[in-house]
Amino acid sequence: MKLSPLHDRVIIQRLPEEEKTAGGIIIPDSAKERPMRGTVVAAGPGTDKVKMQVKKGDVVLFAKYAGTEFKMDGEECVIMRQEEILAVIEK
């Protein structure tokens, strides 16, 4: 399936959270938090007032409950406005 977001919206595919803590303890599924990092899959063209600052392939940080969740090709994705993205994670 191919989706093209409109205006200043962005489609983000959530990145999986760590399975272990830094100390080596395995985190059970019931204790895992929702991932707050993801990769931009598609970005809209922006508007006259909003210039797009993220592009396809950027890894971003966003609020835990931001956007609207949906499944695309079996993967958990989120669609949100660019303003809901908190930061771009630099490599």
Image (cartoon, helix red, strand yellow):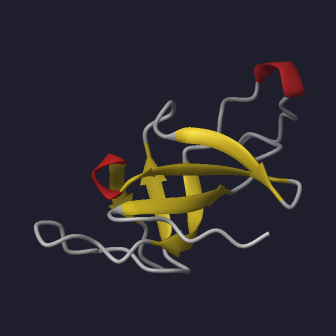
Which quadrant is the N terminus positioned in? bottom right
**Quadrant in the picture for residue 44:** bottom left
**Residue 29 visible somewhere in the drawing:** yes
Using residue 21 as the reference point, say whether residue 75 is left or right of it. Answer: right
**Residue 17 visible somewhere in the drawing:** no
**Quadrant in the picture for residue 75:** bottom right
Q: Residue at 43%, 68% (x, y): give it.
A: 89
Give the x, y percent position of residue 40. 54, 69
Q: Residue at 41%, 59% (x, y): give it.
A: 9
Give the x, y percent position of residue 54. 37, 74
Give the x, y percent position of residue 51. 20, 74
In the image shown, does 2 or 64 lie closer to the viewer? 2
Q: Residue at 44%, 47% (x, y): give it.
A: 62
In the image shown, does 19 or 52 lie closer to the viewer? 52
Q: Residue at 78%, 48% (x, y): give it.
A: 71
Using residue 16 as the reference point, say whether residue 82 is left or right of it. Answer: left
- The mark total stands at 0
- Taking 86 as reference, is 26 above or below it? above
- Taking 1 as reference, is 86 above or below it? above
Give the x, y percent position of residue 32. 75, 29
Residue extending furthest left? 49
In the image shown, does 28 or 8 lie closer to the viewer? 8
